[in-house]
Structure formats: C-alpha cells, structure tokens
Amino acid sequence: MKALIGLEDGTVLKARSFSGPGEAAGELVFNTGMTGYQELLTDPSSTGQLIAMTYPLIGNSGINPEDMESAGVHPAALLVREYQRWPSNYRATGSLADFLKHNGVLGIEGVDTRFLTRKIRNAGTMKALISTEDLDPDSVVRRARAWSGVEGLDLVEQVSCETKYRWEDGTPVRADHFADGTGYRVVVYDYGVRYSQLRQLTRKGCRVLVVPAATPAEEVLAVQPDGVFLSSGPGDPAGVRDAVVNIKKILGRVPIFGICLGHLLLGLAYGCRTSRIQPGHRGSNHPVRNLLSGRVEITAQNHGFCIDAAGLPASVETTHTNLNDGSLEGMRHRELPAFSVQYHPEFATGPHDAEYLFDRFIQLMEQAS
C-alpha cells in the first residue's frame, strides 16, 4: 500500500505500509538498536514518536508476550528499510505486522532510513506526517508543520496507570497497599514505567506498589515506603507540573531513585533546568562515563530532553556523562539520599552494565532503615 512521508523541512519520501491504511503525525526520530523492536514499541517513553530503525531488516524475531514492556503500543508509527514477513524465532507467537495492525500503529517500509537518520542527526528531531490516504506532497508537508509538537505537553497523563497496583510474579495486581512479607517497600511513581523496571526491583527482593503519576506525596508517605522510585516516561518534563511538587515534598524523607523522565523531574525538583537535546539519544549502544568509578558503561537510552549541567545547584553533583556529546547522564544529591540516571539500567533489551544502580538504591534504603 502506497504511503507518503512529509517532513516539516519540506522533504517528501515515498514508502509502503505493511500494516494497512492510516495516518500518523509525530516526532520523527531514529533508534540505533539492532534488536529489541518489541520492547521499544511497548515502551511508554516512545509516545508521540515516529521511529525510524537504523538497522535495515526488522521483523525477524516476530512478537511474543514475554517481551512486552507495557500493556500497549506507544509510537505512532515504525519506519524500516525492509520488513521481514516471516519471523524465525521459536518464541514468536505472531508477526510484527499483525501486532501493529491490531494496535492501530502504522508500519512503514521501503524507506531510506540512512537518509532519514543523517537528516535528523544533522538538523535535529522533526515534525512529520505519514499517510496512506493523503498522497499530495504539499498537503502532507503542510500538515506535518501544523502538528502541535510535544513541548509543554503532559504526555504522562496518557500512559500512567489509573489505579494503584502491586507487581507480583510478573503481573500487575490491583491493590492500594504493599504485600505482606519481607523486603523493602518501594512506591513506584508511574510516569510511563517499563515492566522491566518493576522486574528488577522485585528481583532485588523489593515489595512494589505502583501509583498513578498524580498521586499526592502525602498519600505516598502515608503507606510508609522504604524508598520511592521515579520511573521513565515520555515527553517534556516541564509539562508534568504536579510531579515536581510531589517530589519536593518527598525529597529527604525517604531514598529516591529516578530513571529517564524520573531523572529529569528530580532535577526540576532540585531547581535545575531542562532543555532539548538534538537529535536525542535512542538506542542500546550509548557510551557513558561513570565519574565516580572511571568506568565506561554501554547503555540503553530513549530520550529527547536533558538536564542542563551548568545549572546544577551546589548540593547536587554530576555522576555520569555521555561520551558522545558530554551531556549529563547521572547525578546525586550530596546531602540527601537521592540519585538518578538519564539512561535505562534495566537492560531490556540492552547491556547489563548499569544493573548496579538498583543495588545502590537497596543500599540507600538499608542505610535509612
């Protein structure tokens, strides 16, 4: 099925849909991961994105229920050079095309993804529109430019859970209190949490209670958690205003660990500034230097905003930096039990180099108990 891709800079590309008819507007970004497209598609951090995969052949491993990172599919479209229609994986229970079609997400092939990647890398993230219905080049460009963008929007409200739940045996169980038993009690603020983050916490022996993003701090502290985890999530942190107010009230009361959007929101609570980072960090091979140990970690990332390192208050120190562009990738408070990283240490799918950060969170809770 014929499709057109219109970019806000006037570029128009011809392509084909492998998931049926439709239209999608969003941020055109690229991801450098060679594997893990299912995890990427089900990561709430991908909300509002049109994702171009740099690896040229996508679809080989199909889809399976074990690799879901949430209950839904979050990008508006997936763009690939070539789609593999016949998956070859003993774990596969379905094809990528059927998965996208079932979830109303466009799958686009026949795209020169190297051209798109070079364009985005040089010019930055762009607004784009993809359509199988509107094949007028001028129209798709005009409509791409008219798309609102994500700056200042609260995308978290689209992906956060509606009710509290416990994470037990790899499954969400509706509840408003921690499970009985041993292990540290961790409240997870759901800004777009990935299931692998919950798996890691429970693997470390924690009892996990997930709460909606807008849950008041007083309600969180009332359940007497040993620690609070600020999850990853999509979009501009400046649009998630209530979260910063709640984090300020919790800061210093119990240990805090933030990842990705949680890291950015914690930074805003410190008084830092956030800004766009172009063209964004998306993939499973980003090198990060741990300034505390001197080691270089290979990390998985999926973000388009960052903390302004020059604006850190004296009470906060940088712990990690990106070796590609020097941006801030991690920080910790010098006096309070709180730390965070911009990347994804839960390694689904990706490297295991940063798993130690979950152990550091456990140690902070031990010291506070």
Image: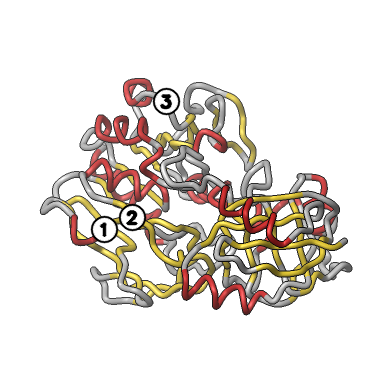
Report the label total. 3
Residue 154 relative to residue 116: left or right: left
Q: Position of residue 354 (x, y in %)?
A: 42, 64
Point out which mark residue 275 bears: 2
Viewer-proximal residue, 222 or 115? 115
Hey, what amino acid is under mark 3? Thr
Q: Residue at horizontal 53%, vertical 26%?
A: 164
- Pointers 1 and 2 in contact (CB under 8 A)? yes
Q: Residue at x 47, y 75 (%)?
A: 122
The image quadrant that residue 35 belongs to is bottom right
Counting residues from the start of the chain, the first of labels 1 and 2 encountered is 2
Q: Position of residue 27 (x, y in %)?
A: 56, 56
- C-alpha span from label 1 to label 2: 7 Å
Q: Which SS class for mark 1?
A: loop
Residue type highlighted by circle 2: Ser
* 3 or 2: tag closer to the N-terminus: 3
The CA distance from mark 3 to mark 2 is 26 Å
Relative to 325, say whether 251 is above or below.
above
Pick the front one: 322 or 335: 322
Residue mark closest to the camera, 3 vs 2: 2
Image position of 141 (left or right of 283): right
Q: Quadrant of the N terminus?
A: bottom right
* Residue at image location 53% in from the left, 69% down from the top: 284
- Amino acid bearing label 1: Asp
Colouring method of the image: secondary structure
Left or right: 263, with 196 as reference point: left
The mark lying in front, picked from 1 and 3, is 1
Say few, some or many: other residues with alpha carbon within 10 Å of mark 3 (under 14 / 14 to 19 / 20 or more): some
Q: Which mark is residue 308?
A: 1
Q: What residue is pinned by disc 3?
A: 215
On the image, which quarter does residue 97 sit in?
bottom right
